[in-house]
Image: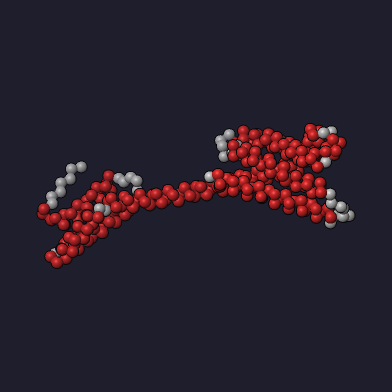
C-alpha cells in the first residue's frame, strides 16, 4: 500500500513539474518571439513555473475538500455554498503562495507593492476572474477522476456479484440434481431399454422435464409452492417409473 501511494505521489508530482516546464516554455516563446522580442530574465521563467507550482501545492487541499463535499449529497445547496466560500479561500491561498515565490526571486518588487499581504490582496482582486476558471477546471477534473474510479469500482463489484451468483446457482443446481440420483436414473433407463422400451422412453421424458424445471428455477431465490410441488411431482414420477409397484406415494397438502 505504501509503495502504491508513493508511486501515485511521484506520478502526481511529475505531472505538475512537466506542466510547469511546458507553461514556462510557452512563456519563453512568447517573450522571445513577441513584437518586439525582449530579453528573457530567469526570474520571469521561474515566476511562470511558480504559477503552476502554486496550484500544485494547493491541489491536495482542493482534492480533500472536493471529496469531503460532494454534490451527490441531499443538501446540495449547502454544498454549493461551501464551494463558493472555499473558492474565495483557495484563490487567496493561491495568490499568497505565488507571492511567496515572487518574494524569493524579487523581494524588492514585493516591498515596492506594500509587502506580502498588500500584494496578495491586490493580486487576488486583479486576477480572481482569471484564477476562478482555473480553480473550477481543477475541481471538475477531480470530480471526473473520482467518478471514473467509483464507476470502475461499481463495475468490479457487479462482476464479482455476478460471479458469486453464478457460483451459487451452480451449487444450488448440484444440490438439486444429486449425482447418485442422476446416475441411478440413467442406470434404470439403461436396464429398462432391454425389458420395457416404453417405460424407458417414459422415464427419459420424465427426466428431461425434471432437468428442465431444475434449470428454469436455478436462478430464482424464491419459488412458489406450486412450483415446488411440481418439482417434487416430477421427481416422484421418475422414481415411480423406476420402482413401479414398490413405491407408493401419498401426498397430503
Foreground pick, 101 / 119: 101
Question: In the rendered view, does 226 fall on the left or right side of 104?
Answer: left
Residue 31, how many percent across, how many down? 83, 53
Left or right position of 116 against 208: right
x then y, percent, for residue 47:
78, 45
Identify the colour scheme used: secondary structure
Q: Which quarter shows the C terminus?
A: top left
Q: Which quadrant holds residue 57?
A: top right
Whole-percent x and y of residue 245? 10, 54
Q: Is residue 128 visible?
A: no
Q: Residue at x 15, y 48 (%)?
A: 249
- The percent position of residue 79, horizontal first and vertical second, equals 62, 35
Q: Quick one: 116 or 10, which is closer to the camera?
A: 10
| Residue 70 found in image quarter | top right
Looking at the rendered structure, the number of numbered marks drawn on it comes to 0
Camera-side residue of 246 and 35: 35
Identify whether 115 is placed above or below 150. Answer: above
Q: Residue at x 66, y 42 (%)?
A: 59
Residue name at image x 65 percent, y 43 percent: 139
Return the residue found at the far right.
Answer: 36
Residue furthest to the bottom in view is 194
Quadrant of the rendered image containing residue 77 = top right
Amino acid at each position: 500500500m505504501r509503495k502504491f501511494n508513493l508511486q501515485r505521489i511521484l506520478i502526481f508530482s511529475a505531472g505538475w513539474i512537466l506542466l510547469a516546464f511546458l507553461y514556462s516554455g510557452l512563456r519563453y516563446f512568447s517573450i522571445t518571439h513577441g513584437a518586439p522580442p525582449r530579453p528573457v530574465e530567469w526570474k520571469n521563467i521561474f515566476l511562470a513555473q511558480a504559477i503552476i507550482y502554486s496550484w500544485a501545492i494547493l491541489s491536495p487541499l482542493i482534492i480533500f475538500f472536493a471529496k469531503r463535499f460532494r454534490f451527490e449529497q441531499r443538501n446540495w445547496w449547502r454544498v454549493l455554498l461551501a464551494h463558493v466560500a472555499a473558492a474565495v479561500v483557495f484563490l487567496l491561498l493561491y495568490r499568497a503562495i505565488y507571492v511567496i515565490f515572487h518574494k524569493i526571486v524579487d523581494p524588492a518588487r514585493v516591498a515596492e507593492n506594500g509587502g506580502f499581504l498588500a500584494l496578495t490582496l491586490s493580486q487576488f482582486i486583479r486576477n480572481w476572474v482569471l484564477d476562478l476558471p482555473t480553480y473550477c477546471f481543477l475541481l471538475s477534473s477531480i470530480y471526473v477522476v473520482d467518478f471514473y474510479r467509483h464507476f470502475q469500482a461499481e463495475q468490479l463489484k457487479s462482476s464479482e456479484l455476478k460471479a458469486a451468483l453464478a457460483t451459487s446457482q451452480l451449487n444450488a443446481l448440484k444440490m438439486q440434481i444429486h449425482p447418485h440420483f442422476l446416475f441411478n436414473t440413467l442406470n434404470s433407463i439403461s436396464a429398462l431399454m432391454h425389458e420395457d422400451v416404453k417405460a424407458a422412453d417414459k422415464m427419459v421424458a420424465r427426466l428431461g422435464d425434471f432437468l428442465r424445471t431444475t434449470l428454469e428455477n436455478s436462478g430464482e431465490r424464491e419459488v412458489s409452492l406450486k412450483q415446488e410441488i411440481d418439482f417434487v411431482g416430477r421427481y416422484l414420477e421418475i422414481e415411480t417409473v423406476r420402482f413401479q409397484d414398490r413405491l407408493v406415494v401419498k401426498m397430503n397438502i
